[in-house]
Image (tube, rainbow, N blue to C red):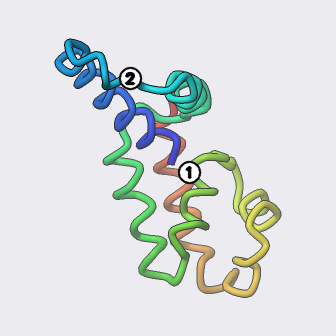
Amino acid sequence: MDCEATNILQGIQGQMVLLSADPSIKLPESFDRGQQYAETHSKYTDPPSVRRVLETLAKHGVSNSEICVIANVCPESMDEVFALVPSLKGKRSKLSEPLKEALDELAKLKK
């Protein structure tokens, strides 16, 4: 998820202060671009809470990649989820209630 990537990249950047004394250790330019992308596109400020909310969907057969899409796209409705993640359409009746609850909780966690 973008929000988790942001935290990880910020941690790496923080460690670079310690490592900057060693001239052989340099982060590529793509690191900064990746960090900027993750920060710009992250929809949430509390990744552990987002993860907890979305873990409930895993119990209903939603894969990690599907969970990641839901978190990164930040859909507002179940119809939007099923349009963006077509692999979930076959599980619509099984996922209706848990997905609605997850979307409601995610809405509370948005930036």
Q: Residue at x 68, y 47 (%)?
A: 76
Q: Within the image, what quadrant is residue 21 found in?
A: top left
- Quick one: SS at disc 1? helix
Q: Within the image, what quadrant is residue 52 found in?
A: bottom left
| Picture disc at residue 26 | 2
Q: Mark 1 or 2 closer to N-term? A: 2
- Quick one: SS at disc 2? loop
| Picture disc at residue 71 | 1
Q: Residue at x 37, y 43 (%)?
A: 47
| Picture disc at residue 5 | none
* Residue 6 to residue 50: above or below: above
At label 2, counting other C-alpha atoms closer than 10 Å, the crowd grade (few under 14, some 14-19, many 20 or more) is: few
- Residue 11 placement, left or right of 71: left
- Residue 100 placement, left or right of 54: right
Q: Residue at x 54, y 32 (%)?
A: 38
Q: Residue at x 31, y 47 (%)?
A: 48
Q: CA distance from mark 1 to mark 2?
A: 31 Å
